[in-house]
Image (spheres, coloured by chain):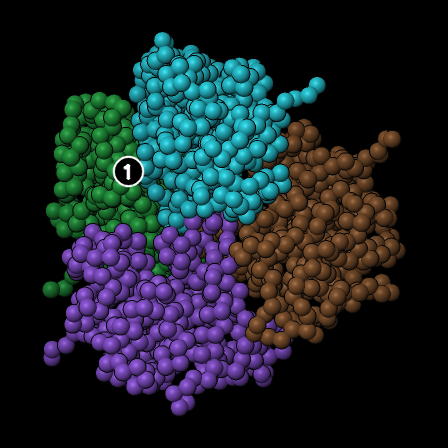
Chain colours: A purple, B brown, C green, D cyan
Amino acid sequence: MVIEMVNVGVLGATGMVGQRFIQLLANHPKFEITALTASQRSAGKRYEDATTWYLDDNMPESVKDITVVDTDPSQVKDVDIVFSALPADTAALVEPKFAQICGVASNASAMRMEPDVPLVIPEVNPEHLDLIETQQKNRGWDGYVVTNPNCSTIAMTITLKPIYDNYDIKRVYVSTMQAVSGAGYNGVPSMAIVDNLVPFIGGEEEKMETETQHLLGTLEDGVVTPAPFGVSASCHRVAVVDGHTEAVFIELEDPCDVEEVQATMSKFQGLPQKLDLYSAPKNPIVFRNEENRPQPRMDRNEEGGMSVVVGRMRRDPAFENSLKYVLVGHNTIRGAAGASILNAELINEIIL
Amino acid sequence: MVIEMVNVGVLGATGMVGQRFIQLLANHPKFEITALTASQRSAGKRYEDATTWYLDDNMPESVKDITVVDTDPSQVKDVDIVFSALPADTAALVEPKFAQICGVASNASAMRMEPDVPLVIPEVNPEHLDLIETQQKNRGWDGYVVTNPNCSTIAMTITLKPIYDNYDIKRVYVSTMQAVSGAGYNGVPSMAIVDNLVPFIGGEEEKMETETQHLLGTLEDGVVTPAPFGVSASCHRVAVVDGHTEAVFIELEDPCDVEEVQATMSKFQGLPQKLDLYSAPKNPIVFRNEENRPQPRMDRNEEGGMSVVVGRMRRDPAFENSLKYVLVGHNTIRGAAGASILNAELINEIIL
Amino acid sequence: MVIEMVNVGVLGATGMVGQRFIQLLANHPKFEITALTASQRSAGKRYEDATTWYLDDNMPESVKDITVVDTDPSQVKDVDIVFSALPADTAALVEPKFAQICGVASNASAMRMEPDVPLVIPEVNPEHLDLIETQQKNRGWDGYVVTNPNCSTIAMTITLKPIYDNYDIKRVYVSTMQAVSGAGYNGVPSMAIVDNLVPFIGGEEEKMETETQHLLGTLEDGVVTPAPFGVSASCHRVAVVDGHTEAVFIELEDPCDVEEVQATMSKFQGLPQKLDLYSAPKNPIVFRNEENRPQPRMDRNEEGGMSVVVGRMRRDPAFENSLKYVLVGHNTIRGAAGASILNAELINEIIL
Amino acid sequence: MVIEMVNVGVLGATGMVGQRFIQLLANHPKFEITALTASQRSAGKRYEDATTWYLDDNMPESVKDITVVDTDPSQVKDVDIVFSALPADTAALVEPKFAQICGVASNASAMRMEPDVPLVIPEVNPEHLDLIETQQKNRGWDGYVVTNPNCSTIAMTITLKPIYDNYDIKRVYVSTMQAVSGAGYNGVPSMAIVDNLVPFIGGEEEKMETETQHLLGTLEDGVVTPAPFGVSASCHRVAVVDGHTEAVFIELEDPCDVEEVQATMSKFQGLPQKLDLYSAPKNPIVFRNEENRPQPRMDRNEEGGMSVVVGRMRRDPAFENSLKYVLVGHNTIRGAAGASILNAELINEIIL
């Protein structure tokens, strides 16, 4: 049997998330990188020459000789899907142009909240992909744009999904301790993080608060109605390279047994697991029972960085029907490049 | 005018908090260090020889030649007050013995929740010092034990006090990012904290939850009735030397104007400010208006480490009558040694 | 063809280096872990229950159920080789006992400088293994002890070997920036390393100075004559988890062309490469040409942590016939567990 | 007695070194800040509004309301001395213009190696200030430019001075572990420094190698002849906020007694000490005898950051007539702003 490879491109291929895309796609059984784009300064160069490689693994041999082109659909030939690691402002301009001719699986925030653009975590709300049809009709595109949420939102929402499937959530508080890689290579000066932390990440709290409701919302007649419970976030940057840690406090509407909740979360499987998608972790949620886990350096790479690791699950003695836990998710894998790739794998399997 | 100096001792003088006591007392205008105790291994040595000094400032000359004695009341002559930096288990054994003959201002957790032992932050609940009389009667002591809360609790409760004075608090969630110095010099291995964090601190959450209610509770007929609102904490250790950062979420019973709350907090003054006590900061709460403050390295030393610095004060859009903010407090000054010293200064001023 | 597996044990299996042994041996094609030892406190427990696992990869399934035994030859049945991750004082007592019955490939420093104990890096001085025969004759052992050098020494000496093969070295200065994992999990408190470094590592400089000469020395008539050039080391601990960085300054006796030296180092291959041993890196020395490499987080895992990465190779303009460079080597892989395993693979191939 | 204050300005006042100038000058008994300059973007704003303050101490009240002006002599009225914290390229353009009308005490590297510009550490080579006369004659300036060396060079050269006064130095090797503040607030990304180090600092090694020789050189007939011994440096950036650590290896021409050398260094005093200049430390070199000191976080603030702290002084067993030690110096105080201020104090005292 010959597998027909899907030709894919990476938009913004030289940055931190762009590099993760390349790392994760380099040995992909169905996707083959055929195009890499970057800013005009890099266009025309070999990828190896255009890029300061930031990841601990070496740059894959297979991409070194690809000639980087400008981030412009006219420069990118014969791709089926492009993965977008563009900054939000560039994404707003060029993703719609690419969508005229191919699929766009975007990690950028630009189009996430547009009503006809699916914002999807495959384990959480695959049914929102139905919006692609609406989108193509609305906009007259041959391709489409599908987006994944912000890194902090993805990790938390995966853990909320099995809870929300089984219990009515009344409110959620979340306090994050986020890795510096989330801000890009030059995003956080070392002066700001050695013996220090920064208790502010622009736009992050708003994203966690709105995207979570959207992801757990219901799609009906082409419109997503957000989940009805409130989410309040406080977001902080700490001296960790990769892996966001989040302290989550949940109040439910009704009494619950915390061990039952944990059991529900542990055995949670979504559509990617059922379809056995290549990038899908066997366990979207992995529990650690040690009292001092999860820890970002130890747990971020669970199942190749695609699982969210949860620990310290406990009843909240302060309030009725309440529980709390801590999670760690890899922000540039599960929270960015891996999220977009899993979206594309799902679309490739069920739609195309 | 001759000032009669109060003779003070430091119990557990060689450890991290013991060293802070010495640093803060070295130039004190009313307290003079006349005794230093440590474990038997150190007894008989000059303080300089017995101690690996951990603080960035040099060891004060005045204590170098003091002979360290065993932590035993029979070894400590002519002190009026001892400051206790003892571990909880030792404190439980020896603090009552010292209290038979002198005042004990303790940073240890051992006796904090005993019904006749005042747990006091001078700006918050100075009236709880009335328990000293009860205590002396109950136990037949000539001296007394007064305790201060856990470091994380102190910083948060100082910020809650002016709110609680003016509004009914319904619930509080708090997520901490705590400095490694809080665990003692050898408490947190570097393997646990480089490119990592530890989402667990033994007993800390319980202390924050119970001590806060106790501090804001009312003393009547010799009994403290805890404040009626719940507190839920999640505590985490991060790669910061000194200074605990806390994300605080508060729900009030009634609507409030956030700017009004901030104004109330900004102008808050307690009894130590009115009495102009030596270690009292002019402003127990200092606001920073930059969007990315407070930060521990930048803000922990505000007013000699005795102020709590608050920033990111904002309405919580997710819930009614809710607000959130971030605070930084110096854990071994305001949160430990400075707290005990301020307690002793207050007692010295109003009782003795 | 059936491969007869060699039964191996790990002495001191629950510590940091012990865990590396287990990680590296778990999928080994020729060595099979059949015994794990630790202190009496752990003896009798399942390995999973006895161990706080420190590595980022999960504990291999295959060792979880092995019952840990006391570090005593009478407790260890049917092993062909034991790998020793013991502290020096324990090693001095028990390694000779094990050597009566089996091979001991030791990472401990205890016996390194004994005249009849080979101190070996397989790429550097495999011929020193001839001492095993002398050793067995001297001591009447059926087994043997082979040791590998200190972590910092290994990385530097691998880079010196091809130079010394081709040029007369006059002197070497080396200044190290060593990872905290080298001191064991609890070895370096975070208070000592956050916004700080520690310019002292007990015994390390002496080891670098003597072991390097010994490794590059010549074995004749059962006696190793050290290499005649001096080595001066200054050793420092920095805030890095894994991977030692070393700045090396070399003066040669005669003029040299730096590019030629680099070429010689780049193509260097030792006996493990010729024999294609399982743990042997294809390139013992890997050059990076970027001006700011090697860096420990980026380069320590080169070829599974078994290559030494060198960069910043340059003529030293200050002195005649001089050059300098920077290297990074993985301290617990190439510098410890991997070193012992490679020694055992070589012995297994050429002697047994 | 009325002290006539010297009016001073700070060029490049909003950056990291500019802020240190302000912090150190705020309470200066002889210098009064009357002008602050920055780039055009900041010109016209109040200093407080123009500046993101990076230091742990709060911004001095006295400068908050000063209006920042463009870095142009026509904008700066009535100053006697300007301190330059400009980047090298800007310094090259504007320092000569300022020198037409006032003294320029510069921390920039632009003019350090010009033959008629004194490069001075007051304790090391105050006699080089005689070049000012030559300079004024050559260039027709009413003012002058005096420079201080690079931060790493200053700390090392202060320690070399008393040795060189008493012994013939044959060669020096130095390996640095430098603080991130040396690169400016945004200079080192946290991605480069968390669990990592960067073994390269552009231009730093060349500066250490040439400036050291120049400082210890002799001025005769208006020309500085460099000291005749070679210096070889390897420079590295580590995860420390402030304080450069340097491992120094020295070979002397003749035998020496290490304790004698240490004694000579300990009691070393230069002209600033004799003149009792305001910013002069009582001891330019302070020894720590603990085996693991100096450490940057503990020792950088010795005597207000103006002393260099030395430890681990030891004979180098590898080579004849050799010794080695480790030093810590505060890079933005002794190594930058404080150095320029001490230069100005000396000039103000002996020349003007």
* Side (left or right) of B251 relative to B270: left
Residue C138 visible somewhere in the drawing: no
Q: Which chain carries label 1?
A: C
Position of C127 with respect to A147 (left or right) is left
Q: Residue at coordinates 59% horizontally, 42% vertically from top-left?
A: D64
Spot occupied by residue A45 in the image (x, y as percentages of width and height): 18, 54
The residue furthest bottom is A221
- Secondary structure under tag 1 reads strand
Residue B199: x and y, percent? 51, 61
Q: Quadrant of the rendered structure where residue A97 is?
A: bottom left
- Which residue is under mark 1? C326
Task: Return the residue found at the far top.
Answer: D221
Q: How many discs mark residues in the rendered view?
A: 1
Q: Residue at x 49, y 35 (%)?
A: D75
Q: Mark 1: few, some, or many residues within 10 Å (few <14, many ≥20)?
A: many
C264 over A6 or under it: above or below: above
Residue at 61% across, 45% down: B301
Instruction: Tell me the quarter of the image containing the N terminus of chain D.
Output: top right
Residue C222 to residue A102: above or below: above
Closer-to-camera residue (C75/A6) = A6
Q: Position of residue D49 (x, y in %)?
A: 55, 48
Q: D336 or A33, which lies in front?
A: D336
In the rendered view, does C323 fall on the left or right side of A242? left
Q: Which quarter of the picture shows residue D212?
A: top left
Instruction: Tell me what residue is drawn at x 66 percent, y 29 percent.
Output: B61
In this orientation, which residue lies closer to the viewer: D334 or B157? D334
